[in-house]
Every structure is written in C-alpha cells, then in structure tokens.
Amino acid sequence: MTYPAVIDLLPHRPPMVLLDEVEWFEGASVRCRVEIRPDAPLVEEGRVRAVVALEHMAQCTGVCTMLRARQQGRGPMRGYLVGVRDLRLETDSFEVGDVLHVEATLTWDGADIAHFECRETRAGRQVATASLSVYRRPVPQDERDHP
Amino acid sequence: MRPAWVTGIGLWTPGFDSPERWASGQPDPGETEPACAVVPARQRRGTSLVTRIGLDVMGQAATRGGADLSTACLVYGSAFGEFRTAIDQLRMMEEPEGRLSPARFKNSVHNTATGILSIAFENREPGTAISGGRSTFAMCVLEALLLLDHRGGTVVVGVADDSLEVPLCRGPAFAPLGVALCLVGEMTLGGNPFPRKGVSPGPPSPKALTDFPNFTGQLAWLERGGPNDHHSVAEELRHNPASAGLPLVEALLARRAGRVSLVPDDPDPCSVEVRFPDGDVP
C-alpha cells in the first residue's frame, strides 16, 4: 500500500521533518520509519541523544491525525503537544545509520484533545515509550487558502 | 543527609481550611475557596485554583512555623501544575479573535506560586517548582531536605493539585487539595545546636525549639521501605497526587513516631521517619 509523503501530512519543513516515510496505517495506529542520517538535525559526532525519540513520536501523532482526517474527509488539523507522560528511554543515544520504527496509537479522540500511546523500536527492540496528549483544532479555511 | 524539623503544617481542601480541621473530620460546607491571605488580592488576580491553594497552604505553614518568607527557600510541587491554564490559553488562541489573556499567560507557568510569593516578599533565595507524578510530594520533600542539608535555614514546601479533564487526568476525578510543611534545618535542643554546614544566608544562629509553639516533629529521609497503605485517606482525595502528603500530616498531628510513606500505594515507596525528640507527649 502506498501512503502520502510525510511532508504532505505535516506542516514541518526540512530539515525538521524527521520521519522518512509512513510504513503502515490502520484504524487508529500508524507506524513510520526514521533513519538517522549524518546531516540530520541534532546529530553530533555520529550520534543523536535518545530524547529525540520524543520529537519522532510527536511527528508520528501528527501523521496519524492527518491520515485519519483524510480518511474521514476532514480538512487539515493543527496540533500542539501539551503533555508527555511516562517517557521511558532505554538507550542513551541513536547512531548514524540506525533505522527506527515509530508507532503512535490514538487512544482518546476528544473534541479538541487527543491522547496517543507511542513506542519506538530499533532492530526489533523497544528503545522508547511515552504517552502523548495533543491539543488539536481544524486549520481555518482562510489559512488553508493563504498559508 | 541531616534530618529536618517540621515547625508548621498547612492544608486546604474544600470543607477544610487547616490541618486541624481536616484531622477533626468535621468539614465546613462554606469553605469553598482558599483564603490565600499570604499575598495581597491584586497579586493573585488571574491565578488558577491550584495556584491559590499552593499559596494558601504555603502561607499557613510559614505562618505557623514562624518562617520569614523573605529569606526562606521555597519548594512547590504539582503533578499537573498549570495544565488547565495552558489548555485554556490554547483554546483562546484558536478562537477567531486569537487573543490571549496577559494576566492568565503570566500565571500559566509551573512556578507561578513560588514566583508570586517571591515577588510579594522580595525573596531572592532559591525557589524550585517540581512535577513528579505520584512521587511529586516525595520529590519535593527530598528537594527541601537537600536544600536544608546544604544551606541550612528554612524551607517552605507545598504541593497542590486539582483534577483535570479526561484524558489529561487518568483515573477518577478528585477533589482539589494542597499540603505544605515549614522545615528548619537546625534547632537547639537543650542548648546543643546542630552543626552548620557551609555558608548559608539563613538565620544567623540556630533557633531554639521553644521558639516554635507549633513545633510538630522531625523528619529523616529514608531511601526505600516503609508502609505503603493509604487507606485512611478519603476516596475523593485519594487520587489527588498531593494526597501523598496526608499520611505524614496525620502522623505529625497525632504525634505518631515511625516510618511514613511519601508515595502511598507504591509497592516500593520512599519514606521518612518521623521522630519527636522532645518526647511523645504534646
């Protein structure tokens, strides 16, 4: 199955689009792929601190929200990360060349607040987990017409 | 780490405006808003309920403990802090007019309570704001004991929380609650001052136990172990992270020596040992 490019789903622009591609999407869950490249933001001496997983997860929640909005025929949404709970990092850093898989599952879909359970794996092993709360609102029509 | 002396306690929850009233179990139905008399009304304008509770209980503890709020270190904890204010601000920002309230914006940070106190009393000593989930109270007490061990003087530590909407708040909703302690690092007991460590801007000499009519006891930090039951806490408060301080308040008021958990319901809690070196008779 082919999915839209990440850059078409998020408002971010390079170099801050950290996710490479959508690997899988179904219902309320999405999985994205990230490869740590030498010229990626925050990489120093061939490594990036593991806390970057939080940004991977946050972008993954945005991808999930947008894929669901498209599937349901709704317009784009704007999201603010408002809460992170139980962030658990099981490594200190990622190295250039590491391929990571980031998953986000929508577990609460309120009027304007959503909640996601997220995890990140490397070579089949879990390296980060967290619960993210996101405040979301539709992007007004005039902003869509004149971004 | 040296033990600390508890010289004052503060507590507020709807129906109960003091630790003693809470311990009596007799609520006042008219008690629905903390008096918050420690700071002028204009300085608490635009603050959230959780900030006003924090100010109120820290003020109670400082007043009862004879603390000078212009020189005491301040430690404030809240698991959820100003989360509600932040969400309200985002909602305002996303309204068609997109205007933010300047008053609410300045009160939307986690250290709002310590900021207001430090401005009101021109306090230039360290002020810390902590969030640590169910361990918030324990981490605040640890921070206070470390400050006292390092600097001496007085630390006023307060923890307050209010329920949030689902899903920001897991589990059942709970009543708002604040708990505070006034802690002193050094005290003379029969004319034998505890040795001071390093240079401290705290009081010029150790105070005497008799200076504190509301003296309640001494705390010594224990890394692990201790009881973990929370059964005495009312159901409507039990899920409030600040309720972690209630077993300690109860032990101090009842002058019951022994280990008290600071993370109730945790299978491996950290705790303090409560002592009454002047004897167990009130």
Image (tube, coloured by chain):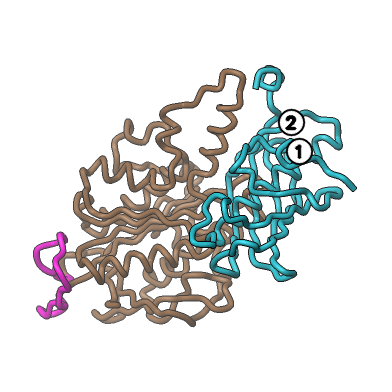
Chain colours: A cyan, B brown
Provide the residue designation for mark 2. Answer: A76
Q: Which residue appears at 71% of the width and 29% of the height?
A: A138
Residue B244 in percent (x, y) is at 49, 65
Q: Is residue A141 left or right of residue B11?
A: right
Chain bearing mark 2: A
Q: Earlier in the sequence, mark 2 or mark 1?
A: 1
Q: Is residue B78 left or right of residue B167?
A: left
**Mark 1 surroundings within 10 Å by alpha-carbon count, few (fewer than 14), some (14 through 19), many (20 or more):** many
Q: Which mark is residue A66?
A: 1
Have a look at marks 2 and 1 and say if they share a chain: yes
Q: Nearer the viewer, residue B239 or A136?
A: A136
Whether residue A49 sits left or right of residue A127 in the image: it is left
Tag 1, which chain? A
Residue B7 counted in the magenta span: no
Q: Quadrant of residue A79?
A: top right
Residue B232 % position (x, y): 54, 69
- Kind of residue indicated by mark 1: Met
Residue B208 image position (x, y, % from top left): 14, 70
Magenta: main secondary structure: loop
Q: Residue at x 18, y 71 (%)?
A: B209
Query: Which span is picked out in magenta?
Result: B188-209
Type of the residue with mark 2: Pro
Under circle 2, the secondary element is: loop
